[in-house]
Image: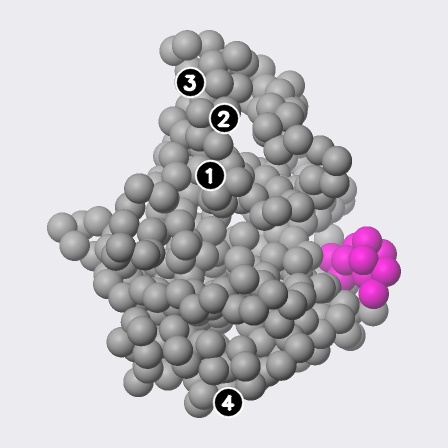
Amino acid sequence: MKSQISRIVSFFTAPVFPRRAISIEAQQVAVAAVGRKRGAIAVTHAAIQPLPTGLIEPRFTELNIKDKDRVSHAVAQALEKAGLKRERRWSLAIPRKATRTFIVHLDDAPASNRDRMEMLEWKVERLLEVALSDLTAAFQRLQSTNGQERYLAVVASNEVVASYEAVLASLNITAGFVLPAHLAEAAWLQLWPTERDALLFAAEPDHLTVIFMRQGDFLSLRSVELVGESLADEIHRTLVYYLDKLAPHGLPQLDTILLIGSLLNVNQVVASCRDLFPMEQQPTVRTLRDERLSHEISWETVAGAAGLAAMGL
């Protein structure tokens, strides 16, 4: 590992990478390739392959994959379905729970880049209580707020990342770019640029990921365990938090809310917005569900893979 910065990187500074991506999740493997048609992003190839329950159990500090050969076979099946089995260069999205993503603030501007890296690494070690030598980490500078430097930190276990890469290596595939699934999904907020604020809700059965962006930059992100919590109530609280803490000068500038996950109810989110936002400042609530690629695949089922692939456009 080179200076603790590795293949998990922020897409703001990523090198040129393929317009193809594989997403390995607990429930399925998804593959997607993208291009442009009439100036708009188009998914040119896509497929999903379901995985048996328990074959992948995403964890931060433990190996996730119970049987590498079975997962490799599922990837091969998805590539076959998508007509992409001959491609060898891919980006890879791995489960959110296999990583940690957070925003680090530096109160004082470091005197040098070396001091900056040492301070960021120290903060990560202190927060996670794991030696950085055991981690793959990357930092991306964000817009400063209140005179403080801010960095997006993306962290994963070396062994966990290597295990996902090994799945592809057995198929002679190189993962040149690795990103957590929720950041790959958040790419859609960048692919729909706005001068105002945007919000992603990505829901799993027991978990909600919340990402706020401002003018294409990460503003706030958090992960919420939904044990005993109502998803609708948590969404309502998040919107209240935005109005109380994040809206500039107390004036809501939320332009777009993107929902990813079948558990999210569009009507409930719209109702919360109507309760909380002035009528002339209602955000647009969007999903990828109605965009169909075939009779069995919607954009939402390949949201992470397609979002990651589209970063190469």
Question: In terms of depth relative to the viewer, which is nearer, 196 or 202?
Answer: 202
Can residue 120 be found in the magenta stretch? yes
Cα separation, mark 4 vs mark 2, equals 43 Å
| Residue sitting at x 52%, y 69% | 51
According to the image, label 2 marks what residue?
Answer: 269
At mark 3, the secondary structure is loop
Q: In the rendering, which numbered label is found on residue 170? A: 4
| Residue sitting at x 76%, y 62% | 121
| Residue sitting at x 56%, y 69% | 52
Residues at circles 1 and 2 in contact by the CB criterion of under 8 Å: yes
Q: Is residue 285 visible?
A: yes
Of the two numbered discs 3 and 2 on the same chain, state the one appearing first in sequence. Answer: 2
Write down the region rendered in magenta. 119-130
Residues at circles 4 and 1 in contact by the CB criterion of under 8 Å: no
According to the image, label 3 marks what residue?
Answer: 282
- Say which amino acid is labelled 3: Gln
Provide residue 256's location: percent of width, then percent of height: 42, 31
Q: Is residue 158 visible?
A: no
Cα separation, mark 3 vs mark 2, equals 11 Å
